[in-house]
């Protein structure tokens, strides 16, 4: 071997040795990183986010995890609200429940009376976080209040607003939809008579919430006794005794028979009927902003829900969900859960969340921050929901709805109103039957939980 080749061999061995050492060092660093990640306390959060909302929720989680190095929130989608609730109940029975769960507002009493939750204010106080509960938007926090403090952390809160195709209204000679149902009736009729659109309103899948429950709240009509359930478990449904609520179902049936109101079908959702330009209007959550902004290729806008002539409209009510803390977890997990909830409640996070999703910021501080940034000047339809929610002072009829097993009674209401759409029942007959059947559910719930 020549001197030159010997030197080359030694250099080759040196380079290979250096590379091996570097590789070992890299593995060591990676393992150290893995150890650091493994050392974080994992906070399991079961949520009901899907589609685009799931992407935004995962970004929220990633931002929290990157903001500190003690905790790692692990978000797990469990389907829709009902599926998430069912999964939680099954898991709790075998002590496999998560630390946090996202539950719909209709599940409030189910969660609160379950014996499985730790009130959020109790947890936050124990972990040393000072939360100004009075800063939460009244109709949002008010829904979850128990003894002046919310039992759960308001999270994705929305309310229905009135979406419309501005081009269709302009073609019919209107600048915008009228403020009353009576004005709107004439406008939709004119749009139809002039052949401007194939349908004038798409019926929302959640019409029971947007066009009946919120209708009752805005008109200040009692939906149930005992302040719509806030006053006790011995509440009863009385929506069938309101001439205005009966008249609203009658109006919807009349529109349907006239071809003005269309039920989605043939693979199209109500929002697709609107964003495709087929239907001129629809009533949907403010969280529909993402779908409308990305799908509508025409000049669209939104406004407040209509009210009856001669009535001073009250606030609308919320939909969406809140975050609940479940019992049976470690102190470290609860510390992490509190840190995450504090992160969510911060104005910075709330403003970001609202901009990304269309949900309303749940605190006044976040709302004021977004407003000071000029966000609502550039996106005026984004402010409608919070202005509608905060309109006036909530009454017993507009505060919201707190009924036991509300999902079951809501399903019965929808079932009965289907009979109106098909001509099998009158609006009064359907609402009477829905109230009677719903009250049976309320009595069962009362008997089960009265002792608590």
Image (cartoon, rainbow, N blue to C red):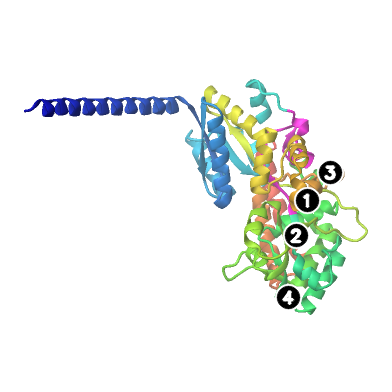
Task: Pick the residue in front: 291 or 27.
Answer: 27
In which quarter of the view is residue 284 placed? Answer: bottom right
Q: Secondary structure at mark 1?
A: helix
Q: Nearer the viewer, mark 3 or mark 2?
A: 2
Q: To which residue does mark 4 refer? A: 259
Q: Is residue 76 above or below residue 183?
A: above
Among numbered discs 3 and 2, the one appearing first in the sequence:
2
Q: Nearer the viewer, mark 1 or mark 2?
A: 2
Q: Are marks 3 and 4 in contact (CB under 8 Å)?
A: no
Among numbered discs 4 and 1, the one appearing first in the sequence:
4
Q: Nearer the viewer, mark 2 or mark 4?
A: 2
Among numbered discs 3 and 4, the one appearing first in the sequence:
4
Q: Are marks 2 and 4 in contact (CB under 8 Å)?
A: no
Residue 301 shows which numbered tag? 2
Q: Residues within 10 Å of mark 3 (few under 14, many from 20)?
A: many
Q: Are marks 3 and 2 in contact (CB under 8 Å)?
A: no
Label 4 and label 1: CA atoms lie apart by: 29 Å
Identify which residue is drawn at 75% across, 55% down: 161
Q: Which residues are magenta?
A: 132-160
Q: Secondary structure at mark 2?
A: strand
Q: Is residue 437 visible?
A: yes
Q: Is residue 147 visible?
A: no
Q: To which residue does mark 3 refer? A: 394
Q: In the rendered image, which quarter contains the N terminus?
A: top left
Task: Pick the residue in front: 8 or 441.
Answer: 8
- Tell me residue 258's x, y (percent): 76, 76
Q: Is residue 135 above or below residue 305?
A: above
Residue 384 shows which numbered tag? 1
Q: In the rendered image, which quarter contains the C terminus?
A: top right
Residue with the most extreme left position: 1
Q: Can residue 72 be found in the magenta stretch? A: no
């Amino acid at each position: 071997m020549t001197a030159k080749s010997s030197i080359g061999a030694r250099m080759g061995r040196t380079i290979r040795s250096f590379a091996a050492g570097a590789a070992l060092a890299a593995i060591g660093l990676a393992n150290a990183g893995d150890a650091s990640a493994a050392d974080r306390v994992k906070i399991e959060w079961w949520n009901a986010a899907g589609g685009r909302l799931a992407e935004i929720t995962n970004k929220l989680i990633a931002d929290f995890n990157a903001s500190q190095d003690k905790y790692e929130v692990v978000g797990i989608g469990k389907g829709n609200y009902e599926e998430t609730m069912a999964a939680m109940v099954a898991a709790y029975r075998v002590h496999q429940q998560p630390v946090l769960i996202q539950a719909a507002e209709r599940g409030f009493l189910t969660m609160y009376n379950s014996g499985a939750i730790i009130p959020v204010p109790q947890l936050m106080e124990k972990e040393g976080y000072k939360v100004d509960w009075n800063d939460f938007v009244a109709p949002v926090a008010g829904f979850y209040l128990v003894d002046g403090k919310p039992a759960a952390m308001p999270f994705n809160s929305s309310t229905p607003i009135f979406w419309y195709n501005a081009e269709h209204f302009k073609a019919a000679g209107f600048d915008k939809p009228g403020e009353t149902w009576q004005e709107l009736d004439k406008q939709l009729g004119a749009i139809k008579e002039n052949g401007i659109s194939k349908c004038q309103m798409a019926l929302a899948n959640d019409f029971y919430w947007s066009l009946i429950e919120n209708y009752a709240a805005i008109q200040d009509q009692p939906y149930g006794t005992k302040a719509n359930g806030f006053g006790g478990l011995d509440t009863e449904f009385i929506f069938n005794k309101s001439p205005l609520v009966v008249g609203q179902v009658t109006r919807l049936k009349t529109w349907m028979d006239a071809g003005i109101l269309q039920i989605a079908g043939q693979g199209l959702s109500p929002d697709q009927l609107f964003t495709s330009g087929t239907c001129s209007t629809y009533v949907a959550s403010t969280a529909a902003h993402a779908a409308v902004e990305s799908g509508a290729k025409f000049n669209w806008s939104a406004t407040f829900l209509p009210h009856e002539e001669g009535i001073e409209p009250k606030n609308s009510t919320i939909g969406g969900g809140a975050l609940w803390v479940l019992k049976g977890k470690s102190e470290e997990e609860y510390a992490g859960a509190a840190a995450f909830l504090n992160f969510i409640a911060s104005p910075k996070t709330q403003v970001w969340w609202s901009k990304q999703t269309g949900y309303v910021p749940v605190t006044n501080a976040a709302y004021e921050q977004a407003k000071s940034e000029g966000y609502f000047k550039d996106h005026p339809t984004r402010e409608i929901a919070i202005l509608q929610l905060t309109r006036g002072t909530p009454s017993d009829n507009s505060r919201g709805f707190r009924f036991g097993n509300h999902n079951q009674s809501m399903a019965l209401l929808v079932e009965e109103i289907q009979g109106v759409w098909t001509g099998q029942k009158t609006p009064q007959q359907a609402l009477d039957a829905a109230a009677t059947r719903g009250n049976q559910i309320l009595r069962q719930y009362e008997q089960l939980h009265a002792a608590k």
